[in-house]
Amino acid sequence: MINTNKQIEYWIEGAKNDLDAAELLIKNGKFLHGLFFCHLAIEKAIKAFVVKEIKEVPPRSHNLIYLSEKANLIIDEDFTIFVGVLMKYQLEGRYPDYQPELPSSEMTSAYLLKTKKLLQWLENQL
């Protein structure tokens, strides 16, 4: 049996660290990698919810929708749409035959801000 509180803390701390990395990357014009870390931050925060729900180590999945369902996590429509946007920037999207269209600097900054808000909301729900 796992230590649920330690697992939740592990995932949330990882999410915060990845958000810091996303901010640095985006600040330095590395939008694709910054958005990948935005996705990773939200993925880890949702995995904290999975741990809380199932009392086990979360599945090795990067699919935010699947993980949200596994956690029985209810998020509003605006955040649901945003999670779909972040999915374009996950690791599987890095293959040479898939080149996601990069948003403008302004839109990337808006995505970073939205990631921060979603992460804060998720933390507050734990």
Image (tube, rainbow, N blue to C red):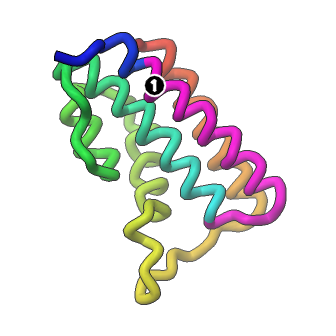
Task: Where is residue 64? Give x, y as percent.
Answer: 34, 46
Is any atom of residue 57 visible in this view?
A: yes
In the rendered structure, the answer to whether residue 32 lies left or right of residue 72 reads: right
| Residue 49 falls in image quadrant | top left
Q: Residue furthest front?
A: 1
Vertical position of residue 121 compared to residue 79: above or below: above
Is any atom of residue 78 visible in this view?
A: no
**Residue nearer the viewer, 42 or 103:** 42
**Residue nearer the viewer, 121 or 123:** 123
The residue identified by callout 1 is 10
Task: Where is residue 32? Give x, y as percent.
Answer: 62, 66
Find the magenta span and give its range: 9-32
Question: Badge 1: few (under 14), some or many (20 or more) residues near its Cα, within 10 Å?
Answer: some
Number of callouts in the render? Answer: 1
Quarter of the N terminus within the rendering: top left
In the rendered structure, the answer to whether residue 97 lies left or right of residue 101 reads: left
Q: Residue furthest right?
A: 28
Q: Residue at x 77, y 62 (%)?
A: 105
